[in-house]
């Protein structure tokens, strides 16, 4: 397994819509393993493929009960709402209150290519929604108010310049 480089805000790969995976091959399994290792190494609770420069619909999360990987994830049901502070490895040092569903049902393929349906709540539900956003080129800074964004302007500029 290898630790991959995390792409930061300002890198165009984070703004692209990722492509569905046609088949879960050994190459995809290797990507999943590397993403899990990279997430753990960086003390993140989730990671999406574009964050390591890969334009494919693959996400991993680990909210404390072991890693979960999903290929072609699709949220089919959302329930409840709450607001919680979130960060992102691609936007380091920025924390923002984000409104998300508290429960989701998400379907996708597991590492073996088998179709799975997963019900998640609270932190896991939040992490899954955050990672699926990444696959559509959406970052947490897109979900904050204009005023908060303006306050973060200089910090964001710095991250952009270093990316
Ligand atoms: Ni993120």
Image (cartoon, rainbow, N blue to C red):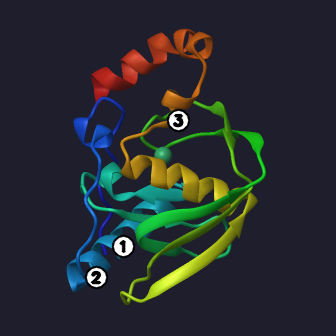
2 or 3: tag closer to the N-terminus: 2
Label 1 beta carbon less than 8 Å to ligand 1:
no
Q: Residue 120 at x, y = what percent?
A: 68, 68
* Distance in Å between CA atoms under marks 3 and 1: 23 Å
Residue named by callout 1:
32
> Which quadrant of the figure contains the N terminus?
bottom left
In the depicted structure, whether residue 126 falls above or below residue 9? below
Label 3 beta carbon less than 8 Å to ligand 1:
yes
Residue named by callout 2:
24
Can you tell which quarter of the image residue 122 is in?
Answer: bottom right
In the depicted structure, whether residue 65 falls above or below residue 12? below
**What residue sits 23% from the left and 84% below the top?**
25
**What residue sits 28% from the left and 82% below the top?**
24
3 or 1: tag closer to the N-terminus: 1
**What residue sits 77% from the left and 46% below the top?**
81
Q: Residue 104 at x, y = what percent?
A: 66, 63
Q: Is residue 101 left or right of residue 106?
A: right
Q: Residues within 10 Å of mark 3 (few under 14, many from 20)?
A: some
Can you tell which quarter of the image residue 94 is in?
Answer: top right
**What residue sits 48% from the left and 64% below the top?**
74
Q: Is residue 149 left or right of residue 163?
A: right
Closer to us: 69 or 43: 69
Residue 128 appears in the rendering: yes
Q: Residue 53 at x, y = what percent?
A: 25, 51
Residue named by callout 3:
140
* Distance in Å between CA atoms under marks 2 and 3: 28 Å
Q: Residues within 10 Å of mark 2 (few under 14, many from 20)?
A: some
Helix, strand or loop for disc 3: helix
In the depicted structure, whether residue 122 falls above or below residue 161? below
Q: Is residue 136 left or right of residue 56?
A: right
């Amino acid at each position: 397994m290898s630790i991959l480089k995390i792409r930061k805000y300002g890198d165009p790969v984070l703004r692209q819509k990722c492509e569905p995976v046609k088949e879960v091959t050994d190459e995809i399994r290797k990507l999943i393993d590397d993403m899990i290792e990279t997430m753990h190494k960086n003390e993140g609770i989730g990671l999406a493929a574009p964050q390591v420069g890969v334009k494919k619909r693959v996400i991993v999360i680990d909210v404390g009960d072991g890693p979960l990987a999903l290929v072609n994830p699709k949220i089919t049901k959302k329930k409840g709402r709450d607001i919680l502070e979130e960060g992102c490895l691609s936007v380091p040092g920025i924390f923002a209150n984000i409104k998300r569903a508290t429960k989701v049902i998400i379907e996708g393929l597991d590492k073996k290519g088998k179709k799975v349906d997963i019900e998640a709540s609270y932190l896991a539900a939040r992490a899954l929604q955050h990672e699926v956003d990444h696959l559509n080129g959406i970052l947490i800074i897109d979900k904050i108010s204009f005023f908060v964004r303006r306050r973060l302007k200089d910090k964001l500029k710095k991250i952009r310049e270093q990316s």
